[in-house]
């Protein structure tokens, strides 16, 4: 069948091209008024929508063409898909994205390269998918802010621990944002099912269309070769394969015939030895890998493919009341017992920790106050989980039972807030005694995060319509973004220097583990009156200066390194 005689299916509408268009027009003119041109049943069959236009199959479709199909070719062989121009442009864009990834990251430390790649990824996504903002996906568009802010931290700060966490968190934030933005999610973002939705969807979307780029590329070659069975590209490749052994034999013969030619050919292997094939193959593999998974992922989003099904399309079919099965009387009894214990513990905190009353014999205040914060955090987490479960699965019961349960839950939360305050205060005392570290600062930040979640939980106790996961997820995303921007290493260095000038105590070994964000504070110690501290500070600064002024790629450029160079410029 020639190219002009194809029936091209666009969705479910048939478009006739070439000679068939003239025949259809003449047949339509010859029809009596009110009659319709008969359409074969096979042409009305719904065509699969894989992003390409496909020619219809079947003998009925071919019967309208009087001169197209030779007798020796089966008429029911499906024609190759015809892809749109935007699909071919997207193929080129995905390939460029893979090349860009290799150029920015292969063998280089992350820096300004991260926000540049994120911007390039979203440019390709928006150009091909073209998502339209709507009221239902406001959270998806809100996620654009933390995605960009977290990507910028690689350009602004150098804390290694946070960098590792961001490398793990950023792809999942992007997956969540893009899936919600394009409407490819099976569950709402505040439903527990969204976790499985994102994990399964991320891997499925990245793998399910890996063969599609090769099909599009093959269709491009076919179109350029006029639709023949063997494209020009295939014929060229076959010619190269045939020519290689012939060329090898000719090179050997000509090298024996001419000494100069033979000398030149002998030098070819030496030139090839200068090429790092391992590095080249590594770059090629990374480029192809990123190209294929990016193509497959965005192609799937374009078609809003979903990999989990639910009762009504977006969330579990069970209502909130159907989920509630726990007996309120049993839960009230358990909660009341726990509250009695917590109230007694809170009285102890106000009496001995905050009030600093006389401790029982054998206890010192410093030992008492500087311990127990880990256990209190664990208790707070247990309370958080218990409250989340009881609020979700406990039956309401009578009005009196429900009010009693609310009151007891509120008491539990208030006691937990006191425990968090106690743990925070104990940590402050511990830091004053032993100094500031990354883990201790993160522990304090986590306590503040839990404090906010418990305030939200109090609101949920008295408002049954508030879904807990919705504010929990939003607060978690905001908290993670904020912790990236407080410059933890600079805070640790500043607090430890301040403590040194007050107490004369400092752990210089820990300073060597901090990132370049702490260099400006370390410079202050180099001018310290303590010769031992000053010498150790200058030693650390000397190593930093060597690493900062070593050759580096522009893709790894980081503002923390630049600030450190400025601080060291006078040293």
Image (spheres, rainbow, N blue to C red):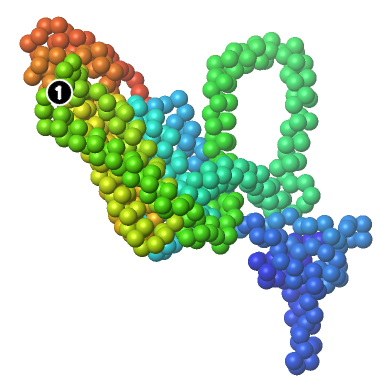
Q: Residue at x 31, y 33 (%)?
A: 377
Left or right: where does residue 283 sit relative to residue 569?
A: right
Left or right: where does residue 295 sit relative to residue 563?
A: right
Can you give x and y, in whole percent of width and height, for residue 443 in the image? 28, 31
- Location of residue 253 by image quarter: top right
In this rendering, is residue 49 above or below 43? above
Tag 1 secondary structure: loop
Judged from this view, the residue extending furthest toward the right is: 71
Q: Residue at x 37, y 37 (%)?
A: 382
253 vs 420, nearest the viewer: 420
Judged from this view, the residue extending furthest toward the top is: 532
Left or right: where does residue 221 sit relative to residue 37?
A: left
Can you give x and y, in whole percent of width and height, for residue 141 in the image? 38, 55
Residue 222 appears in the figure: yes
Can you give x and y, in whole percent of width and height, for residue 70 in the image? 89, 61
Looking at the figure, which quarter contains the N terminus?
A: bottom right
In this rendering, is residue 6 above or below 414? below
452 vs 571, nearest the viewer: 452
């Amino acid at each position: 069948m020639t190219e002009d005689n194809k029936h091209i299916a666009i969705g479910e509408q048939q478009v006739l091209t070439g000679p068939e268009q003239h025949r259809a027009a003449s047949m339509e003119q010859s029809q009596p008024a009110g009659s319709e041109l008969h359409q074969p049943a096979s042409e009305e069959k719904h065509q699969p929508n894989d992003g390409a236009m496909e020619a219809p199959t079947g003998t009925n479709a071919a019967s309208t063409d009087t001169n197209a199909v030779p007798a020796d070719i089966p008429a029911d062989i499906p024609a190759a898909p015809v892809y749109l121009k935007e699909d071919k442009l997207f193929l080129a864009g995905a390939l460029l994205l893979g090349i860009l990834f290799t150029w920015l990251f292969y063998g280089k430390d992350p820096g300004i390269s991260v926000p540049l790649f994120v911007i390039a990824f979203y440019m390709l996504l928006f150009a091909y998918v073209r998502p339209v903002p709507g009221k239902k996906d406001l959270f998806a568009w809100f996620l654009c802010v933390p995605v960009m802010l977290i990507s910028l931290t690689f350009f602004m700060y150098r804390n290694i621990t946070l960098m590792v966490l961001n490398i793990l968190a950023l792809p999942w934030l992007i997956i969540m944002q893009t899936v919600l933005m394009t409407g490819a999610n099976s569950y709402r973002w505040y439903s527990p099912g969204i976790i499985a939705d994102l994990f399964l969807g991320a891997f499925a979307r990245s793998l399910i269309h890996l063969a599609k780029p090769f099909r599009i590329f093959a269709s491009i070659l076919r179109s350029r070769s006029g639709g023949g069975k063997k494209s020009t590209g295939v014929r060229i490749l076959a010619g190269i394969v045939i020519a290689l052994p012939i060329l090898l034999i000719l090179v050997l013969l000509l090298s024996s015939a001419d000494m100069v030619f033979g000398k030149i050919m002998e030098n070819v292997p030496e030139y090839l030895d200068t090429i790092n094939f391992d590095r080249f193959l590594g770059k090629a593999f990374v480029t192809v890998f990123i190209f294929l998974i990016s193509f497959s992922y965005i192609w799937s989003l374009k078609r809003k493919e979903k990999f989990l099904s639910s009762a009504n399309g977006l969330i579990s079919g069970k209502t909130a009341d159907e989920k509630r099965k726990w007996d309120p009387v049993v839960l009230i009894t358990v909660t009341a017992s726990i509250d009695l214990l917590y109230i007694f513990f809170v009285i102890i905190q106000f009496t001995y920790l905050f009030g600093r009353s006389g401790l029982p014999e054998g206890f010192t205040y410093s030992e008492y106050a500087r311990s127990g914060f880990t256990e209190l955090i664990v208790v707070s987490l247990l309370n958080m989980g218990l409250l989340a479960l009881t609020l979700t699965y406990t039956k309401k019961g009578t009005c009196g039972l429900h009010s009693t349960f609310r009151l007891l839950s509120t008491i539990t939360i208030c006691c937990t807030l006191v425990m968090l305050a106690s743990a925070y205060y104990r940590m402050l005392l511990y830091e004053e005694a032993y100094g500031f570290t990354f883990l201790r600062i993160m522990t304090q930040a986590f306590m503040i995060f839990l404090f906010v979640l418990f305030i939200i939980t109090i609101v949920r106790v008295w408002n049954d319509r508030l879904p807990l996961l919705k504010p929990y997820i939003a607060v978690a995303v905001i908290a993670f973004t904020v912790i990236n921007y407080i410059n933890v290493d600079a805070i640790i260095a500043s607090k430890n220097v301040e403590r040194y000038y007050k107490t004369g105590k400092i752990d210089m070994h820990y300073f060597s583990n901090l990132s370049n964000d702490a260099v400006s504070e370390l410079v202050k110690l180099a001018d310290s009156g303590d010769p031992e501290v000053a010498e150790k500070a200058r030693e650390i600064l000397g190593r930093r200066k060597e690493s900062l002024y070593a050759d580096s790629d522009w893709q790894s450029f980081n503002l923390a390194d630049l600030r450190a160079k400025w601080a060291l410029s006078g040293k």
